[in-house]
């Protein structure tokens, strides 16, 4: 039981729970680790050759962990089943390179610290986006400014004067949380030193919002300002919403200049320049163990790679249920894992246009909603009702001049969706029989294009030169994420913070890095996951050498 508590945090005081959860949130937003201590631990682990590491998967969580290891002198081998590194952080070309489309990320915050740690800050350029976001509803079309919570309060108060006091109170709470996340945390005094965090800790977003505002239209707009975690306000933890919204609102959103795949390749270069290896198009079939400890991995081609530690950036279900032999993990641990649910998935539509949109269409990130009932909207997403589900429009050329070639524009449409409506296509899809699936994908693609034309980009259909689309089954094909999950396990009230699966597993030497473990999904969040796993490894190895 004590082992389960350590790994899942199931028996822990509320004060300790919030303190640990807040520490993770804070370090994800602004790195606060004692790197002098971690670097000293890494330097003391000798000889480095006795500590080979295999990283399963070249998503950003895996690449980040591997880059930290390689920079510290440890021999590391990254093994990726796909032919391209990066996981969801990648890009692809169409029409002979006329257009380059992003899978993700569309925006981020807080990535600079990790780039500086790894010595690549000058190789991955981050640029501030022109605005926080644009929100389009049946009654409103609002542009929210970057790094200006006061202006956001003013804008919303002008539209909802009867809610002005509540708007100030709610956004004031977000700002208070942001400040609290920057302060040291002592579980004994957290209720008094971090009152905002304390009050939010056992609330859903719905409960949090209801304390301040009542207008359903206002609530829908406020919810659109938060992170897309795929749960409705009744199920999403208030701290997940607030902790994901406040840093963007204060620090501002940025994106990579260029393409995500270029950034992923920079991480690969860091690993290789320090003597590490990145092996593509190779699948790890088995994590090898002996007497409860990791000893290596075996790949589908029959090769064995010895390892002192294995970091899995693969999905948690694949790691624990397919790669490990039965009986290696405690029954209680497996039972707990099976209570976790994969997150929501998505449909993405990429459009290459034969006209320039920059200066003609307002906004880079545009959230579009058909109504204000957030629970019903979530239901439409789960049901893949493309006529009613909210979706996002990303006009890449509004991020900075020159994203697309002269005379062209690149746009993506993103709709969160459930997996169940796609399950009926699964067997045929993976058997190569895609006729019915393709018909449904095309229907949804056209519906999203029509809604975008009606609400955001007039005349869109006449501009289209290239169309491509991806569904949850596409996600499964390229990333192997169960049900096409886009942020690992869902961040529900029972699976957030200290109750989320830990990166240090019951198998000695086996760690996780990425969105299935802690702290969760998102571009910079999985970078934080990889960094945290490196820290855990140094602490574990440092104890032996110390």
Image (cartoon, rainbow, N blue to C red):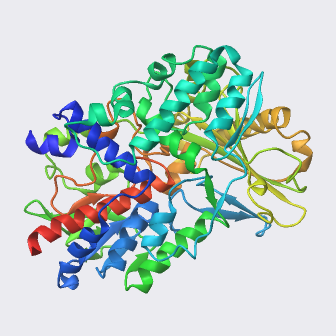
Q: Is residue 317 left or right of residue 188?
A: right
161 shown above or below 64: above
Quarter of the image for residue 361 reads: top right
Visible residue check, residue 480: no
Residue at horizontal 62%, vertical 32%? 224
Q: Nearer the viewer, residue 169 or 443?
A: 169
Q: Is residue 530 left or right of residue 401?
A: left
Residue 279 image position (x, y, % from top left): 42, 76
Q: Is residue 497 left or right of residue 439?
A: left
Residue 508 image position (x, y, % from top left): 15, 60
Visible residue check, residue 207: yes
Residue 433 image position (x, y, % from top left): 60, 46
Quarter of the image for residue 43 reads: bottom left
Q: Is residue 477 left or right of residue 141?
A: left
Name the quarter where the N terminus is drawn.
top left
Name the quarter where the C terminus is drawn.
bottom left
Q: Nearer the viewer, residue 210 or 493?
A: 210
Label count reads: 0
Q: Nearer the viewer, residue 397 or 295?
A: 397
Residue 14 image position (x, y, % from top left): 23, 31
Q: Nearer the viewer, residue 334 or 153?
A: 153
212 shown above or below 88: above
């Amino acid at each position: 039981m004590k082992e389960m508590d350590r790994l899942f945090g199931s028996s822990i005081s509320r004060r300790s729970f919030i303190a640990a959860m807040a520490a993770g949130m804070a370090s994800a937003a602004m790195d606060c680790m004692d790197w002098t201590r971690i670097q000293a631990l890494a330097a003391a682990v000798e000889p480095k050759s006795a500590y080979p590491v295999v990283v399963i998967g070249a998503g950003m969580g895996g690449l980040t962990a591997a880059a930290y290891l390689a920079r510290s002198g440890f021999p590391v081998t990254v093994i990726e089943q796909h032919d391209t590194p990066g996981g969801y952080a990648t890009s692809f070309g169409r029409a002979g390179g006329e257009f380059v489309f992003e899978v993700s990320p569309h925006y981020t915050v807080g990535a600079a610290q990790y780039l500086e740690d790894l010595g690549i800050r000058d190789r991955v350029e981050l640029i501030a986006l022109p605005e926080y976001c644009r929100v389009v509803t049946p009654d409103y079309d609002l542009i929210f400014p970057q790094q200006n919570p006061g202006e956001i309060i003013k804008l919303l108060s002008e539209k909802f004067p009867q809610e002005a006091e509540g708007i100030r109170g709610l956004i004031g709470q977000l700002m208070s949380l942001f400040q609290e996340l920057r302060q040291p945390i002592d579980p004994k005094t957290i209720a008094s030193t971090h009152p905002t965090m304390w009050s939010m800790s056992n609330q859903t977003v719905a409960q949090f919002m209801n304390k301040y505002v009542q207008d359903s239209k206002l609530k829908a707009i406020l919810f659109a300002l938060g992170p897309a975690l795929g749960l409705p306000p009744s199920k999403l933890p208030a701290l997940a919403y607030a902790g994901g919204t406040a840093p963007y609102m204060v620090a501002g959103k940025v994106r990579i200049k260029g393409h995500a795949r270029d950034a992923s390749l920079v991480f690969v270069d860091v690993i290789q320049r320090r003597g590490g290896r990145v092996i593509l198009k190779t699948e790890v079939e088995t994590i090898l163990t002996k007497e409860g400890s990791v000893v290596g991995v075996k790949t589908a081609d029959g090769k064995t790679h010895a390892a002192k530690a294995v970091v899995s950036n693969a999905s948690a279900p694949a790691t624990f249920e397919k790669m490990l032999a039965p009986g290696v993990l405690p029954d209680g641990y497996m039972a707990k894992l099976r209570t976790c649910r994969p997150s929501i998935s998505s449909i993405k539509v990429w459009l290459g246009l034969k006209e320039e949109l920059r200066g003609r269409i307002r906004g880079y990130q545009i959230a579009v909603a058909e109504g204000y009932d957030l629970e019903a909207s979530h239901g439409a997403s789960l049901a893949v009702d493309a006529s009613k589900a909210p979706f996002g429009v990303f006009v890449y050329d509004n991020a900075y001049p020159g994203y697309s070639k002269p005379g062209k524009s690149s746009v993506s449409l993103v709709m969160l969706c459930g997996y169940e409506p796609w399950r009926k296509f699964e067997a045929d899809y993976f058997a190569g029989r895609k006729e019915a699936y393709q018909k449904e994908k095309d229907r949804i693609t056209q519906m999203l294009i029509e809604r975008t034309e009606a609400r955001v980009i007039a005349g869109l259909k006449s501009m289209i030169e290239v169309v491509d689309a991806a569904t949850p089954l596409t996600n499964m094909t390229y990333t192997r994420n169960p049900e096409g999950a886009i942020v690992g396990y869902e961040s529900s009230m029972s699976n957030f913070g200290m109750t989320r699966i830990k990166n240090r597993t019951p198998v000695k030497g086996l760690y996780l890095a990425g969105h299935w473990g802690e702290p969760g999904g998102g571009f910079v969040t999985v970078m934080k996951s990889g960094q945290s796993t490196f820290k855990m490894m140094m602490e574990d190895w440092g104890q032996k050498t110390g």
